[in-house]
Amino acid sequence: MIIHVVRPGETIDSIAEDYGISAKRLAIENGISSPVNLAVGESIVILIPEITYIVQDGDTLSSIARSFNISIMELLRNNPYLSESQYIYPGEELVIKYSGDKIELISTNGYVYPFVDHNVLKKTLPFLTYLSIYAHYYTDNGEVLSVNDEELIGIARDYGVAPIMILVGLATSSAEEIEIINNLLRDQELQDKFINNLISVLEGKDYYGVNFTTPYILPDDRHLYVEFIRKLSTRLKDSGYRVFLTLTLSSFDLLTNVNYGDLQYDILGELVDNVSIITYEWGFLYGLPPSIVSFATLHNIIMYVLGLIDPDKILFGYSTIGYVWQLPYIDGITVAQAISFNSATDLAREFRAEIFYDDITKASYFQYYSDVEYVVRFRDARGIDDILDLVPTYGVDGVSIWNVMYFFDQMWLVINSKYEIKKVIPLSSLDCKE
């Protein structure tokens, strides 16, 4: 894999010619809708096909995969556009294998909301081990509110992806969520009611496991939290479900090197099957995202957690969401606007802004002017590549991605070039395109 940084005057055609590959495929693989108008400084992922195949009459994905001794999932990862087509046609060229060896087998977890576009979902699923559906909410009286997620669960299982239920406190603010969880921790009867209600909801669905997200826990309640997770994990495992835990760290936590030692991460790690360490602002647009934090700080966080939790249980989390701020930035007043990678690069192209890469934070950024001045920060292939290198460096199980509501072409190209994807459940079924 090569990450090419666009220079002045370059186009997809000129870049493709330099590398001896198809310009059309290069644009499709990178999700570039306007291949002529590239932004100076934007990243382009270059993968060189090693084995290709021209579709013949009577071919199906299954027959092609069998003849090359690969899985249908690998065929779809190498040719993601196939998920958007009802049929394959004679004369189509498919990539069977890209050049270069893959590093290792990893787990990938992607978060979605129930209203995710199903076409985007089907295009994404070949790259995932787990699909975490956000969210089932629990209330202050122990009720568990169900959501319309049965179709998503079924589609995930069709692709051999394990569906995970996300559990979050029903709250309108961080303070309210903290109050809900801490009331739960202090009331054993409420805990039993909550767990019984949870299992009742699970019995009507086909989830593989449950992920309990952890808000801030008051110091006096942290030992109670560990005992609650012990009870929850025991009950869920006895009922046949895997148990996952998400530990979230804000930019403040990262910048100040905060750790919550009395949460007993070592014990929590033993109680559950998997732990996602997510470093992002969980939907708060007034705060600054972790992309402004030194990458060395993320290394420190991982080293701290690795001293307490088995690396085989750890998924290191990151966000695919960029942010736009109007300048001047006023702390606590300026509201950021969330933006996807594709939209960020489109914006840079539209305003002919040059994209720069901050090697300290591993984030890309640019400024543009439209009546007022704005600054945009986001992660492109370079930042994703640096994050993914943390997996073999520290021997963790894989990554958790917030979120996969849109298809991040470059990210999946980078992941597919470096890693094989674990599958923990068999494919339920998959229509074979003819």
Image (spheres, rainbow, N blue to C red):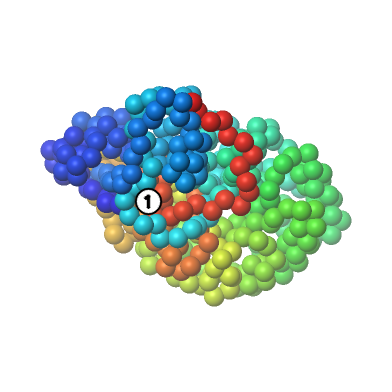
In percent of width and height, residue 289 lies at 43, 52
| Residue 226 can be seen, yes or no | yes
The correct choice, above or below, for 44 with respect to 302 in the image is above
In the rendered structure, the answer to whether residue 415 lies left or right of residue 425 reads: left
In percent of width and height, residue 124 lies at 49, 39
Quadrant of res 340: top left
| Residue 170 can be seen, yes or no | no
Judged from this view, the residue extending furthest toward the left is 9
Residue placed at 42% from the left, 24% from the top? 57
In the rendered structure, the answer to whether residue 129 lies left or right of residue 26 reads: right
The correct choice, above or below, for 194 with respect to 90 in the image is below
Quadrant of res 353: top left
Residue placed at 31% from the left, 51% from the top? 99
In percent of width and height, residue 266 lies at 63, 72
Q: How many marks can you see?
A: 1
Judged from this view, the residue extending furthest toward the bottom is 307
Residue placed at 22% from the left, 48% from the top? 5
Residue placed at 76% from the left, 44% from the top? 202
Residue at the disc numbered 1 = 417
The correct choice, above or below, for 166 with respect to 274 in the image is above
Q: Residues within 10 Å of mark 1 (few under 14, many from 20)?
A: many
Looking at the picture, which amino acid does disc 1 mark? Ser
In percent of width and height, residue 400 lies at 52, 53
Circle 1 SS class: helix
In the rendered structure, the answer to whether residue 165 lies left or right of residue 26 reads: right
Judged from this view, the residue extending furthest toward the right is 189
Name the one closer to the observer, 324 or 319: 319
The correct choice, above or below, for 31 with respect to 87 in the image is below
